[in-house]
Image: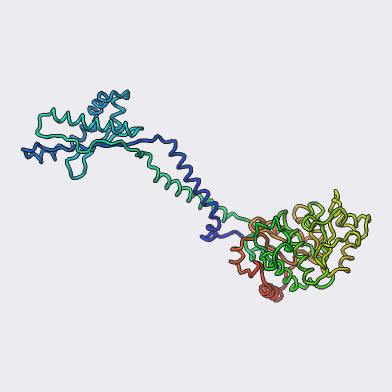
Amino acid sequence: MRHTLGVRQLLRRWPSILVITLIGIGVAAGALSLAPTQYASHADVLISPPANRSTTAVAERLVESYAHVLGGRATAADVVDALGLTRGTGAVDRDLSAEVVDGTSVLRVTATSDSGGRAAEISQAAAESFVTWLGEQDNPLVATIVEPAAASSTPSSPDRAPWLVLGGLVGLLAGLVVAAVRVVSDQSVRTPAELEELAGAPVLGAVAYDRTAVQTPLITSLGTHHPRFEAVRILRTNLQFLDIDHDHKVITITSSVPGEGKSTTATNLAIALAQAGSRVVLVEGDLRRPRVSEYLGIEKSVGLTTVLVGRVNLDTALQAAGTPGLDVLTSGALPPNPSEILQTNAMKALVAELRQRFDVVLIDAPPLLPVTDASLLASISDGAILVVRHGETGREEVRSAAGRLQAVGARLLGTVLSMAPVKELSRHGYGYGYGYGPEYFERTTATRSRGGARKG
């Protein structure tokens, strides 16, 4: 399955397109800064007959040839002599040009230089040289300077605007190409429908990206109408349709890879279930990078591992989490061999005891792909919930995670899409709180019942 290319997909990547466009403009500006700055100045010379003679036809015939004289090498030599320039005649000749002003008998001589004042001096000297030269010729025409040269403070070259526009267009095109390549080659999960197809299990809920989640990861620090709070409530409600919120149910919450929000999801779901009146125990089953105790601000030195090795009993290790109805069994001291400890008979006996004492047992497990811990915990649970991060978790990673669960005979109950953009969730039919509502889940469950439930 690959992402199809469309305008909407490209526009979602507008920040990178904008950055590359600005880079294109910046490159053009940098190139312009290296180009030599030139100034231009011109003087206008009128070719006319004496007042008492009518030789207009002669002037019209000759004025074009006079333009070659005015902008020629001889005039350049006169300019060098008149101004005492150190530059050679050839260099001045290259910077001089003359043309006929359309529909007139006016010759315009233009000079360029790296100085506006010097350009004006050269064009004025060229005009004066031509006037003198024409006066020495045996013809009835007279040359008069009708517009003396003036120094310009604005460079004539390089012309910055067209180059900056060109740089911007090239940058925009490059940005669109890069965005198109990224869209086509993107292997991450971006839609709930895609996640459901990859995992072979329903999407139980979704949580929108919230930049404040790092500082306030728990819903107890949010208002009851906060979107993240509402998303967790929707997840809790959807669990009812799986018939897993009855007495003595054990659920492992995991992810494919680290950084997908599984520990936050597990902790907030435990709080929401307790707030709804269930007796809940949250087990910190991640014995490699435990985060639950950190989120709840409780002691983790005595917990799961100390109970398993027989140093303390379960009642001593359980801690109240501040939410009525919620107890927590933290990780305890981190062992060098987590997988070996989790697959002991002592672990199975502990889960069985927790099943008897609580309505819901939630186990926060490590990611599935890096280590086997989560597969072991899911195999002694009633099922697992897979947390998948929008735009980061790869499609192949989701397939592999589901395959790991299937390999140990564990049931994948459903998935949670985490850290998704609000616009993305709204576009795909999410309800208030940016999570699938119960109506969606009822339809999905009914469809699966008619077509045969998939086993994860």
Quarter containing the N terminus: bottom right
Identity of the residue drawn at 64% across and 65% down: 192
Q: Is residue 9 visible?
A: yes
Colour logic: rainbow
- In terms of depth relative to the viewer, which is nearer, 43 or 161? 43
Identity of the residue drawn at 67% across and 58% down: 389
Quarter containing the C terminus: bottom right
Q: Position of residue 295 (x, y in %)?
A: 77, 57
Horizontal side of 12 relative to 305 (left or right) equals left
Horizontal side of 319 relative to 254 (left or right) equals right
Q: Relative to residue 129, is residue 438 depicted above or below?
A: below
Q: Position of residue 283 (x, y in %)?
A: 83, 60
Q: Position of residue 77 (x, y in %)?
A: 25, 25
Q: Relative to residue 184, is residue 26 depicted above or below?
A: above
- In terms of depth relative to the viewer, which is nearer, 164 or 443? 164
- Which corner quadrant of the image does residue 383 belong to? bottom right
Q: Relative to residue 337, is residue 92 depicted above or below?
A: above
- Which corner quadrant of the image does residue 313 belong to? bottom right
Identity of the residue drawn at 13% across and 38% down: 48
Q: Residue furthest left?
A: 52
Q: Say how many tags the image has.
A: 0
- Which corner quadrant of the image does residue 86 belong to? top left
Identity of the residue drawn at 53% across and 49% down: 19
Q: Is residue 196 visible?
A: no
Q: Position of residue 196 (x, y in %)?
A: 67, 65
